[in-house]
């Protein structure tokens, strides 16, 4: 065991790192308060830390006269280690040196460093210019128009023929207009180009079987007008076409 304060030499000062009075920060106190702080330590770990940090120093030039242990704030101000002395304890003659900023308090120097930008640092590099856009390719020339070709096969959409029993429909017709319509449909169904009753000539049959494929060119304005009028009539017939043709021939030349 270490000797108590009564066995120690008077005038010795110890470095104390107790957690109760100075929150573990080192502060210089005399031997008697140091042993009181050691007894008030709450754990063996704290006592061991105080023993490790303990070191003997000579008493300061102006020791406290009341002999009482000062508070944490007072100890931080007056009982400071030699390595922790502030700028106010520096000899006044040193303030006349060529570089007064070196004697400024550390906190003040740090504040000035934050306020004044470092001129020695190079400016930030300018932003790189965006890469140039790729050159636009010229538009391809338009494709030449397609010429009509006789070998092109055109497939027309054809609906399937409905499966209708015309004989049954004709027997089920109850009204006369419906019976007449179905009779006409039956006549068209049974019609034939080779029927001797139709009396179609060989030239007419050839035109029906091989219609002209070239466009029809009409030079007469009257014929063109009569055809247009004939197609515009609601109830067109061959007789109405002949009448329109004669009327146009009388009123127009050609």
Image: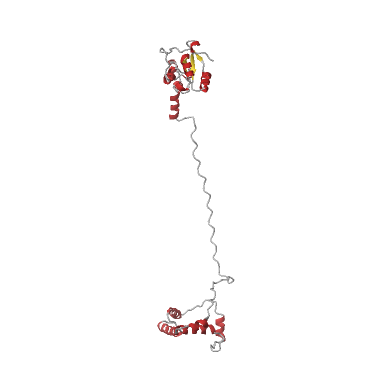
Q: Is residue 99 above or below residue 166?
A: above
- For the question of whether residue 189 can be seen, the reply is yes
Q: Is residue 127 above or below residue 47?
A: below
Q: Is residue 172 above or below residue 89?
A: below
**Of residues 185 and 212, the one drawn nearer to the viewer in this rendering:** 185
Tell me the quarter of the image containing the N terminus.
Answer: top right
Residue 69 horizontal side relative to residue 132, left or right: left
Residue 158 coordinates in the image, percent (x, y) = 54, 73
Snapshot quadrant of residue 88: top left
Residue drawn 45% across and 26% down? Answer: 110
Residue drawn 51% across and 14% down? Answer: 56
Residue 161 coordinates in the image, percent (x, y) = 54, 76
Snapshot quadrant of residue 76: top left
Tell me the quarter of the image containing the C terminus.
Answer: bottom left
Residue 127 coordinates in the image, percent (x, y) = 49, 40
Counting every numbered tag in the picture gives 0
- For the question of whether residue 25 can be seen, the reply is no
């Amino acid at each position: 065991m270490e000797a108590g304060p009564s066995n120690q030499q008077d005038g010795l000062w110890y470095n104390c790192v107790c957690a109760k009075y100075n929150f573990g920060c080192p502060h210089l106190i005399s031997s008697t308060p140091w042993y009181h702080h050691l007894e008030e330590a709450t754990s063996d770990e704290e006592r061991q830390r105080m023993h490790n940090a303990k070191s003997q120093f000579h008493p300061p030039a102006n020791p406290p006269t009341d002999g009482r242990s000062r508070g944490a704030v007072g100890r931080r101000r007056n009982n400071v280690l030699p390595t922790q002395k502030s700028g106010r304890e520096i000899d006044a003659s040193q303030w006349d040196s060529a570089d007064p900023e070196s004697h400024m308090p550390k906190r003040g120097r740090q504040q000035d460093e934050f306020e004044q930008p470092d001129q020695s640092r190079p400016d930030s590099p300018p932003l790189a210019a965006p890469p140039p856009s790729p050159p636009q390719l010229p538009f391809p020339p338009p494709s030449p128009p397609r010429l009509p070709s006789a070998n092109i096969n055109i497939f027309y959409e054809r609906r399937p023929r409905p499966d209708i029993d015309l004989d049954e429909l004709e027997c089920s017709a109850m009204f006369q207009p419906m019976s007449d319509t179905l009779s006409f449909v039956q006549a068209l169904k049974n019609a034939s180009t080779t029927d001797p009753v139709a009396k179609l000539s060989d030239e007419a049959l050839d035109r029906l079987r091989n219609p002209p494929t070239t466009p029809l060119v009409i030079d007469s304005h009257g014929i063109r007008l009569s055809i247009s009028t004939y197609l515009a009539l609601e109830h067109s017939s061959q007789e109405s076409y002949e009448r329109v043709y004669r009327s146009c021939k009388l009123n127009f030349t050609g």
